[in-house]
């Protein structure tokens, strides 16, 4: 059907739905953000015909569809809670991976990206799994790798945004848009690990808590469990994601769903014949749990909320709230701050330069400090060594003195001995002299006697 | 990057476009259109015709009715609503453009305006505390060419050359009802030729994978620049009420495709490519401005040979890298100093040890000497004692002998006497 101008009418994708939406909005006389922003400066003027800018949303949608969408889910939960199965069930496809063992030394995050298509919509889906969560004996550090991962994605985006030559429109956004927190179906309350982890994550990511493997809990237990969980979250100040109620077209369904949180889910990729249809289910001796039966579990609610109704809002919240918070903290950490908008216009250039100068000054100061420290150490060590040297010399001086003393003593002894010797020698010589004399006298007598005897 | 996976059965993300649609309507849209051209070319009338409203009326007169001595840049903001979609439309006009005798630099005001909007956006984007930023950047510029039939004027060429990298230029032939279709064709050909000669880049219609869209885009391309007619009056023609200009010889209908290209312009500008104009402004023109602006910042204090490679890094990243470099440098320096220190200490200690050993050795030597001496002395003494003892023993024997000898003598003497 061509209009007189020769152009086809704007794209007619689910036109009825669109009309409904527009009517709803128009009827409530909602003031758009733009209108609010315009404020006093703009005047409203009536149109005398069909201009055609009501195709703007369609133009935007067309561009988005051509560009493709991307969505990143983070699954946090202990090993064995059925995270991978739930993802398979949600997206009706078999994703990667074998089941992990319980012997991981720490928590690691594994992420996989898939290209999915439904009708004409292409979705780049990234699923990040926490491997080894809750398996360690000491779980104090468990949340750290998760927080680091989330921050790393923010950081990557921030870096791209701050580049001088950047390509944001073709950037593959890896920021986590939704965090499904898997709660073990104990039926009692949240584990302290859960509370601690969720508290650390609630300002960084949209948390959607779900009760995993909920076919282990009976209906009455489930109600109590949900109430307990919600009250514990509230009393601990954990902010979980609330489905938005500001948009009239979805406000009602969203607020109803909000009251059903946390969703009790079951995952299954096996099909069982119920009646004459094949449905996803888990078969037990006592009955069959159907995944898509709303009486059996909240799977359909989760799918509805997460994918069909609020996927775009999750992306928006991540970008305008969580990412902005991260960015603000990071920039403030580096010392950036906004100058008072009233005094003078905020100049990026000046801030960067000032920052840089400050930074260089700091570095130089550090260098100086280090040098000084070294000089100090050298001085100290020199003194130390000098001290040691002095001691050594003193020690040996003492020893030397001792030796000298001893030597002196020995010499004295020697002298006295020599003296003795001399005296002795003298005595000896004198005595010998005497003897000689005596001998000479007596010797002749003896000689005579001997001679006589002989005769 | 990711692997292809087949989705069986219903998942629901095909509803994403609707979610996007819903949110965009809730937010509302904004668009800034600049109109440039000499007075009297029918700019205000065209705007009114385009948006089917009295943007310019007796209350809010259009640029030509406002007497200006110099080129000004003025904006009018209107909020229009259609089919539930709200659009905040800003029309920026330039009264006085090209009207003076000496028009050198009359484009400067325009450039300054566009740059100031870019700057506002850049500053808002660079704040630490960011809020939803209004997008007041100029998304499209309708440039009105006077229907001389001959070609572009030097002012036209100059203006377009200076602005084609800052804004999406859509050249229009104004008051097209003064030319016959053949004259118009000629004129268009001439203009396109001159535009190509001067390497001016006017707004191009994107060719997508969609066949239909590509066909439309090519069709438009063949008609460029669009020749338009505008009118504020509604005339009855053949029972229909149309916008048009009444002449004695007939009515030139604004929305008649055979009379002028107005409908093409409206469809292109508003119905199909409004969003693309915004995208190109955001992804190309704004990014150009931004990278030029920031490159100037980070090049300050950094030598030029490094600056080329830094363009792909954010200033924060740069600082981080510099910090890392510096830390590495400091560590190395520390290591070196440490090494030198250790070496010196070792040397000194070694020396100390050596001298200790030397002294020790001497001490040992001395001790040995003393001991030797001591021993010697002992030996000597012993010898002496021995000698003494033996001599004394000898003496005693001698004494004894002597005594005996004298006794014997005595005896003998006595004997002899008898």
Image (cartoon, helix red, strand yellow):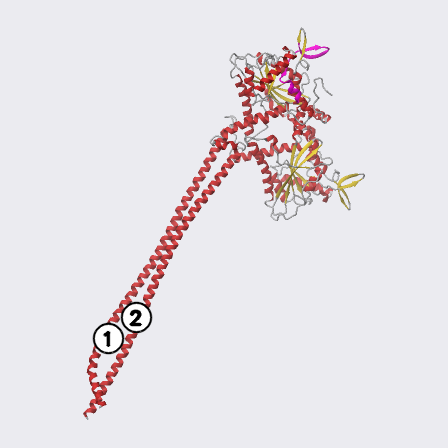
- The percent coordinates of residue A370 (x first, y second) are 44, 42
Q: Residue at point 34% right, 58% down?
A: A398
Quarter of the image that includes the C terminus of chain A: bottom left
Q: Same subunit under labels 1 and 2?
A: no
- The percent coordinates of residue A397 (x first, y second) are 33, 57
In the figure, is residue A272 to the left or right of B257? right
> Which numbered disc covers residue B239?
none
Disc 1 and disc 2 in contact, CB within 8 angstroms: no
- The span shown in magenta is B217-245
Q: Is residue B218 magenta?
A: yes
In the figure, is residue A442 to the left or right of A58? left
Residue wearing tag 2: B380
Quadrant in the rendering for residue B60:
top right
Distance of label 1 from label 2 (alpha carbons): 17 Å
Residue B72 vertical placement versus A207 (above, below): above
Residue A304 visible here: yes
Outermost residue, top direction?
Answer: B248
Mark 2: which secondary structure?
Answer: helix
Residue wearing tag 1: A428
- The percent coordinates of residue B322 (x first, y second) are 49, 36
Q: Nearer the viewer, residue B108 or A401?
A: B108
Q: Is residue A81 magenta?
A: no
Quarter of the image that includes the N terminus of chain A: top right
Label 2: chain?
B
- The percent coordinates of residue B129 (x first, y second) are 56, 31
Outermost residue, bottom direction?
Answer: B418
Mark 1: which secondary structure?
Answer: helix
């Amino acid at each position: 059907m061509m209009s007189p101008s020769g152009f086809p009418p704007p794209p007619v994708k689910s036109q009825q739905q669109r009309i409904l939406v527009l009517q709803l909005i128009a009827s409530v006389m909602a003031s758009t953000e733009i209108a609010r922003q315009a404020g006093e400066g703009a005047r409203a003027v009536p149109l005398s015909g069909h201009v055609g800018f009501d195709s703007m949303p369609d133009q935007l949608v067309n561009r988005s569809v051509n560009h493709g969408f991307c969505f990143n889910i983070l699954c946090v939960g202990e090993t064995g809670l059925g995270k991978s199965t739930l993802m398979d069930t949600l997206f009706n496809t078999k994703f990667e991976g074998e089941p992990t063992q319980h012997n991981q030394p720490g928590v690691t995050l594994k992420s996989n990206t898939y290209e999915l298509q439904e009708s004409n919509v292409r979705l780049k889906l990234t699923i990040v799994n926490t491997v080894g969560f809750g398996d360690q004996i000491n779980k104090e550090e468990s949340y750290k790798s998760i927080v680091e991962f989330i921050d790393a994605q923010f950081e990557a985006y921030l870096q791209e945004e701050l580049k001088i030559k950047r390509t944001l429109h073709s950037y593959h956004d890896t920021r986590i848009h939704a965090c499904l927190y898997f709660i073990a179906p104990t039926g009692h309350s949240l584990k302290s690990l859960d509370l601690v982890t969720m508290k650390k994550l609630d300002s960084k990511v949209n948390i959607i808590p779900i009760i995993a493997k909920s076919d282990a809990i009976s209906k009455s237990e489930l109600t109590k469990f949900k109430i307990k969980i919600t009250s514990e979250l509230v009393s601990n100040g954990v902010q979980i994601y609330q489905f938005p109620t500001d948009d009239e077209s979805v406000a009602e369904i969203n607020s109803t769903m909000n009251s059903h949180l946390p969703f009790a889910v079951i995952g299954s990729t096996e099909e069982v014949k119920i009646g004459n249809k094949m449905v996803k289910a888990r078969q037990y001796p006592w009955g069959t749990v159907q995944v898509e039966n709303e009486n059996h579990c909240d799977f359909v609610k989760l799918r509805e909320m997460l994918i069909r109704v609020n996927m775009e809002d999750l992306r928006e919240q991540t970008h305008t709230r969580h990412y902005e918070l991260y960015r603000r903290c990071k920039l403030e950490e580096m010392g950036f701050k906004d100058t008072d908008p009233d005094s003078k216009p905020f100049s990026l250039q000046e801030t960067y330069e000032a920052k840089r100068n400050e930074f260089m000054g700091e570095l130089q100061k550090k260098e100086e400090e280090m040098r000084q420290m070294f000089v100090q150490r050298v001085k100290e060590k020199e003194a130390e060594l000098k001290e040691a040297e002095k001691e050594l010399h003193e020690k040996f001086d003492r020893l030397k003195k001792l030796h000298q003393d001893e030597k002196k003593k020995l010499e004295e002894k020697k002298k006295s001995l020599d003296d003795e010797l001399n005296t002795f020698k003298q005595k000896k010589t004198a005595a010998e002299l005497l003897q000689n004399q005596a001998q000479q006298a007596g010797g002749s007598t003896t000689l005579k006697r001997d001679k006589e005897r002989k005769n | 990057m990711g692997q292809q996976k087949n989705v069986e059965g219903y998942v629901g993300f095909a509803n994403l476009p609707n979610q996007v649609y819903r949110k965009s309507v809730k937010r509302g849209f904004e668009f800034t259109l600049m109109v440039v051209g000499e007075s009297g070319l029918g700019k205000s009338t065209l705007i009114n015709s385009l948006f089917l409203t009295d943007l310019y009326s007796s209350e809010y007169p259009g640029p030509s009715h406002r007497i200006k001595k110099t080129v000004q840049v003025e904006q009018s903001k209107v909020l229009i609503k259609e089919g539930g979609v709200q659009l905040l439309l800003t029309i920026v006009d330039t009264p006085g453009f090209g009207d003076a005798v000496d028009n050198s630099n009359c484009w400067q005001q325009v450039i300054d305006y566009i740059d100031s909007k870019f700057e506002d956006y850049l500053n808002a984007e660079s704040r630490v505390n960011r809020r939803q930023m209004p997008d007041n950047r100029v998304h499209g510029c309708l440039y009105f060419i006077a229907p001389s039939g001959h070609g572009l004027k030097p002012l036209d060429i100059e203006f377009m050359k200076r602005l084609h990298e800052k804004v999406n230029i859509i050249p229009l032939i104004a008051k097209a009802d003064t030319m016959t279709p053949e004259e118009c064709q000629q004129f268009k050909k001439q203009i396109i030729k001159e535009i190509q000669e001067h390497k001016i880049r006017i707004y191009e219609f994107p060719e997508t994978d969609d066949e239909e869209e590509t066909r439309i885009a090519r069709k438009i391309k063949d008609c460029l620049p669009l020749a338009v007619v505008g009118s504020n009056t509604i005339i009855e023609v053949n029972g229909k009420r149309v916008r048009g200009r009444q002449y004695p010889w007939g009515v030139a209908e604004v929305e008649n495709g055979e009379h002028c290209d107005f409908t093409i312009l409206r469809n292109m500008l508003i119905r199909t490519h409004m969003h693309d104009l915004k995208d190109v402004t955001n992804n190309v023109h704004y990014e150009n401005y931004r990278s030029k602006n920031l490159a100037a910042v980070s090049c300050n204090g950094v030598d030029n040979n490094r600056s080329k490679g830094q363009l792909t890094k954010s200033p924060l990243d740069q600082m981080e890298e510099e910090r890392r470099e510096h830390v590495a440098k400091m560590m190395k320096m520390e290591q070196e100093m440490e090494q030198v220190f250790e070496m010196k200490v070792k040397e000194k200690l070694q020396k100390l040890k050596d001298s200790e050993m030397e002294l020790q050795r001497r001490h040992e030597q001395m001790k040995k000497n003393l001991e030797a001496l001591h021993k010697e002395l002992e030996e000597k003494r012993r010898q002496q004692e021995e000698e003494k003892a033996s001599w004394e023993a000898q003496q005693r024997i001698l004494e004894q002998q002597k005594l005996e000898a004298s006794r014997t003598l005595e005896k003998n003497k006595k004997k002899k006497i008898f």
